[in-house]
């Protein structure tokens, strides 16, 4: 008896539940419809009350015929492409029970609520600590002349605002001939002929080298900073004393790396071509620092380039690399990628893409080591 009562109770529950459901029929496409898609207005009830949409339709075959699939008879009536009746529903209002949204703006490397900005250019300031050296007294000091002057030079002169860098290789033979022996070098001086130079951020770095020439590229060997401060140089200024004396090993050449910004200068110093010392000098070399979204857009086109191209540059990447990064990208008038360099991608691979005929571009890639793209200057060329 209890078993029968339990079963009847279940049936009554289902019957009551079925009465609470409400079906609404919405007419969509009809036989006379002249389009394959249309916008259908659903009832204005709360969309959260809709639980299921069932589509019901019958196929319309021309003249009630079915195509047999035989060549030449595929367009008689309904055929193999009609029987599946593929139909897609799209909610053009984007209203659904799973609400999704995205912000109006996305700012790289920023996750806060309020982003401060200005309407005029801003500037980055880099803090720099000068190293001042004061000599109160000196004993057993020896001064050595490397060369006998036979000319004059204005390599430290220039216009206000010029930022210069120069490298000189002092040959071991010149050091030996001057009488210098292995040991501590505590300063250097310039043989001033005339004029004065007010140099900002004057930095001197020394390193040992077995290389006898500089060719056309700066040597990138690790060097020891020995001098760094704003400096005025004239005939009465005396030696530039190092805050960090350099210990010469007595066997190698010495690479002298000097960089500075000219405040004013008409300095003329004595020079010599003796012992074939190598000198390399450049003016106003600069660099661009960007954050994650910074870029430069190059004006003009490269229509004169057809069969060959080489792209080269110096790069000093952030210590946060590797990340997905792009050094440059160039597209043609139809937005096909013609030149692209990823340096590096997040997998530490460097990618070089070039050339696109509309179906794709050529690519080569190779794993790079950290020291080849970040935390120090490196020169790269892609051809």
Image (cartoon, helix red, strand yellow):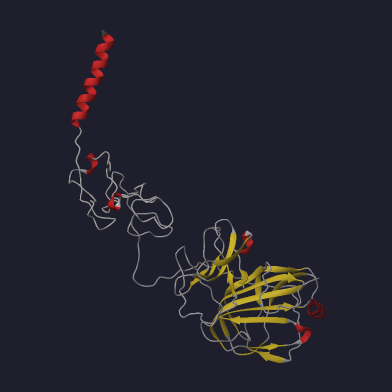
Q: Quadrant of the C terminus?
A: bottom right
Q: Quadrant of the N terminus?
A: top left
Q: Is residue 228 above or below residue 159?
A: above
Residue beneath the point at 76% across and 88% down: 148
**Residue 229: x, y in percent?**
57, 73
Residue 113 relative to residue 158: left or right: left
State the residue lying farthest toward the top.
1
Q: Quadrant of residue 320?
A: bottom right
| Front one among 244 and 261 | 261
| Front one among 4 and 203 | 4
Q: Residue 18: in sight, yes or no?
A: yes
Residue 188 relative to residue 283: left or right: right
| Front one among 376 and 42 | 42
**Residue 31: x, y in percent?**
23, 52
**Residue 149: x, y in percent?**
73, 89
Q: Is residue 152 above or below residue 287?
A: below
Q: How many marks?
A: 0
Residue beneath the point at 24% across and 24% down: 14
| Front one among 382 and 368 | 382
Q: Is residue 252 above or below residue 12?
A: below
Q: Residue 374: in sight, yes or no?
A: no
**Residue 20: x, y in percent?**
19, 31
Residue beneath the point at 76% across and 80% down: 144
């Amino acid at each position: 008896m209890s078993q029968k009562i339990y079963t009847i109770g279940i049936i009554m529950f289902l019957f009551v539940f079925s009465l609470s459901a409400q079906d609404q029929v919405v007419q969509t496409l009809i036989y006379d419809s002249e389009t394959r898609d249309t916008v259908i207005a659903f009832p204005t009830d709360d969309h959260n009350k809709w639980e299921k949409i069932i589509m019901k339709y019958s196929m319309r075959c021309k003249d009630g015929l079915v195509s047999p699939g035989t060549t030449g008879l595929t367009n008689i009536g309904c055929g193999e492409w009609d029987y599946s009746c593929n139909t897609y529903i799209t909610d053009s209002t984007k209203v659904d029970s799973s609400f999704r949204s995205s912000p109006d703006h996305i700012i790289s490397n920023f996750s806060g609520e309020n982003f401060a900005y200005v309407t005029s250019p801003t500037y980055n300031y880099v803090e720099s600590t000068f190293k001042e050296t004061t000599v109160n007294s000196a004993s057993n000091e020896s001064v050595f002349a490397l060369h006998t002057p036979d000319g004059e030079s204005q390599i430290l002169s220039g216009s206000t605002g010029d930022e210069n860098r120069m490298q000189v290789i002092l040959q071991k033979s010149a050091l030996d001939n001057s009488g210098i022996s292995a040991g501590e070098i505590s300063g250097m001086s310039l043989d001033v002929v005339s004029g004065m130079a007010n140099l900002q951020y004057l930095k001197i770095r020394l390193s040992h080298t077995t290389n006898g020439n500089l060719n056309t590229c700066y040597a990138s060997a690790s060097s020891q900073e020995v001098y760094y401060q704003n400096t005025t140089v004239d005939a009465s200024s005396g030696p530039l004393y190092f805050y960090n004396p350099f210990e010469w090993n007595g066997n190698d050449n010495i690479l002298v790396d000097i960089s500075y910004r000219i405040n004013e200068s008409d300095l003329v110093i004595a020079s010599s071509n003796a012992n074939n010392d190598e000198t390399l000098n450049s003016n106003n070399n600069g660099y661009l620092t960007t954050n994650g979204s910074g870029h430069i857009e190059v004006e003009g086109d490269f229509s004169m380039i057809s069969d060959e191209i080489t792209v080269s540059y110096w790069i000093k990447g952030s210590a946060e690399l590797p990340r997905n990064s792009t050094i440059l990208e160039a597209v043609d008038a139809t937005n096909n990628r013609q030149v692209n360099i990823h340096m590096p991608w997040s997998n530490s691979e460097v990618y070089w893409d070039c050339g696109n005929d509309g179906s794709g571009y050529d690519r080569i890639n190779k794993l790079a080591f950290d020291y080849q793209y970040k935390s120090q200057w490196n020169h790269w060329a892609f051809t």
